[in-house]
Image: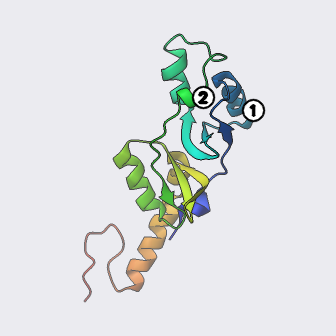
């Protein structure tokens, strides 16, 4: 099994009071597509490149005058660090999102992306294939898992 903890990336946290322009510069410098937003002393939301484009640029707003907290998404969908990446991939598709903050003991410790998962799906499927064969079933993906 390949877990999200094995493929997650570190997170960058910014205060809700940071300007969108400042956050965009951080994202550019670090070559990342999202940052976590801290509100009331804890991570409460996420802002992505797409959020900035749709909620600031496309609206004709000035990034220096807009606080990142005003464009953040606060209804976070998260995944536990021990979750299999196949299950995380299903959650991403079901929720129609591209990034999942990773939690451990209730605390956000990283982030996993569609790209990070897709790079590692072959290893996850290989694990399933070996597991199913060891359990006496057919190879993964051949249809039958009944034993002899």
Q: Is residue 34 above or below residue 142?
A: above
Q: Indicate which label's residue lies in the foreground, 1 or 2.
A: 2
Q: Which mark is residue 68?
A: 2
Residue situated in front as seen by the camera: 9 or 141: 9
Helix, strand or loop status at disc 2: helix
**Which quadrant: the C terminus?**
bottom left
Residue 135 in the image: state x and y as whole percent. Answer: 37, 85
Q: Which mark is residue 80?
A: none
Residue at 53% x, 10% y: name it. 60
Residue at 60% x, 28% y: name it. 68
Q: Residue furthest top?
A: 60
Q: Residues within 10 Å of mark 1 (few under 14, many from 20)?
A: few
Residue situated in front as seen by the camera: 35 or 135: 35
Mark 1, residue position:
29
Between discs 1 and 2, the one toward the N terminus: 1
Residue situated in front as seen by the camera: 114 or 62: 62
Helix, strand or loop status at disc 1: helix
Image side of residue 76 versus residue 140, left or right: right
Image side of residue 85 versus residue 91, left or right: right
Q: Is residue 119 above or below residue 44?
A: below
Residue at 54% x, 19% y: name it. 56
Residue 81 in the image: state x and y as whole percent. Answer: 55, 63
Q: How is the image coloured?
A: rainbow
Number of marks present in the image shown? 2
Residue 136 in the image: state x and y as whole percent. Answer: 34, 86
Q: Residues within 10 Å of mark 2 (few under 14, many from 20)?
A: many
Q: CA distance from mark 1 to mark 2?
A: 17 Å
Residue 6 in the image: state x and y as whole percent. Answer: 60, 63
Q: Residue furthest right?
A: 29
């Amino acid at each position: 099994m390949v877990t999200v903890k094995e493929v997650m990336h570190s997170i960058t946290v910014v205060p809700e009071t940071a300007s969108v322009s400042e956050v965009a510069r951080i994202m550019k410098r670090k070559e990342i597509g999202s940052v976590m937003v801290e509100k009331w002393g804890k991570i409460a939301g996420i802002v992505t490149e797409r959020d900035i484009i749709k909620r600031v640029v496309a609206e004709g707003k000035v990034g220096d005058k807009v606080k990142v907290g005003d464009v953040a998404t606060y209804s976070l969908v998260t995944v536990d660090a021990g979750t299999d990446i196949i299950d995380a991939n299903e959650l991403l598709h079901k929720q129609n999102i591209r990034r999942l903050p990773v939690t451990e003991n209730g605390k956000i410790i990283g982030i996993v992306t569609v790209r990070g998962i897709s790079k590692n799906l072959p290893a996850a499927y290989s694990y399933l294939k070996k597991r199913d064969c060891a359990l006496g079933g057919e190879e993964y993906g051949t249809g039958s898992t009944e034993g002899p």
